[in-house]
Amino acid sequence: MEGSFFEGKDFAKGEFKALIPKYYPQKYKKYIQEETKFLRQKIRGQNRVLEAGVGIGRLIPVLAPLIKEFVGIDKAKLMVKKSKEVAKKYQNVRIVEGKLEKLNKIFSKDYFDFSLCVWNTLGNVQNEVGILKKISGVTKKSIFVTVYKKGTIKKRKEWYEKVGVSIRRIDTKKEIFYSKSGLKSKSYNLKDLRIIAKKSGLKIKQSKVLGGVILLVELIK
Ligand SMILES: C[S@@+](CC[C@H](N)C(=O)[O-])C[C@H]1O[C@@H](n2cnc3c(N)ncnc32)[C@H](O)[C@@H]1O
């Protein structure tokens, strides 16, 4: 669904600002700070953690030193290249080029203690239930998901403009953004996530609002 967005179309002349918090408006900076603090507390001391949709490897320096093995998977060649550059500095990080749809072919059942599907990666995929089922299949304990919270459309528009994403269309009723480069980015409320979790055979253990703009849920089997 994301066309050439994660291959860098909007950022051809420089950094991939969409995944670099120093370029964000205040509320999104706060989201990142709160998410980082939360994840550090949760995953410290675990054996294996998967980041589903690892992007440029933003979380590698934050989380890899706290655990035994960090695996990031992504299907975009640019994201794999960038996250591999970050991963070079860590002996316990592995980056895999691949699709979340194929997770069960790459890793054995319950290989990971925890999985992360953060910064609205779930809102970028075509079939959230199908993806959550795949992540669940390779995860023993919890899956941490963060998505755009419904009701924050004005703030989201400001975020896209600030980081330099060219918007093609906004579905204001469903709160879905479409970029010129082919990104489709959805948003959710807790009820939406409860329905998606249930269809995926999962339950919401806890939920939180981060920075006033992002919804976090911990999913368990
Ligand atoms: C919004 S970014 C989040 C990146 C990173 N998790 C972060 O927090 O900075 C979503 C990432 O998921 C990847 N992605 C989306 N759908 C995917 C799929 N079906 N299989 C593998 N990677 C996917 C994209 O290429 C992109 O790098």
Image: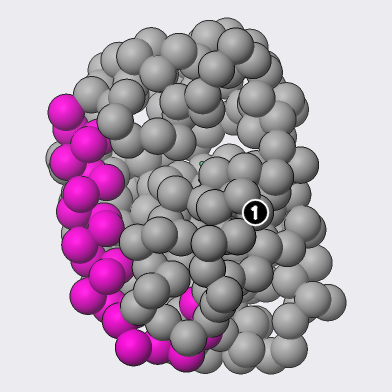
| Helix, strand or loop: magenta stretch | helix
| Residue at disc 1, CB closer than 8 Å to ligand 1 | no
Q: Secondary structure at mark 1?
A: helix
The residue positioned farthest toward the front in the image shown: 89
Magenta stretch encompasses residue 132: no
Query: Residue 72 is drawn in which quadrant?
Result: bottom right
Residue closest to the eye, 168 or 40: 40
In the rendered structure, which amino acid carries the disc numbered 1? Lys
Query: Residue 183 is drawn in which quadrant?
Result: top right
Residue closest to the eye, 151 or 160: 160
How is the structure coloured here?
one colour
Q: Is residue 203 visible?
A: no
Q: How crowded is the residue under tag 1: few (<14 C-alpha within 10 Å), some, or many (20+)?
A: some
Q: Position of residue 146 (x, y in %)?
A: 37, 54
- Identified at 18% across, 32% down, the residue is 27
Residue span colored magenta: 26-49
Q: Position of residue 123 (x, y in %)?
A: 52, 43
- Identified at 20% across, 49% down, the residue is 33
Q: Is residue 59 visible?
A: yes
Height in image: 17 above or below 214?
A: above
- Residue at the disc numbered 1: 84
Q: Position of residue 145 (x, y in %)?
A: 41, 61
The residue positioned farthest toward the right in the image shown: 105
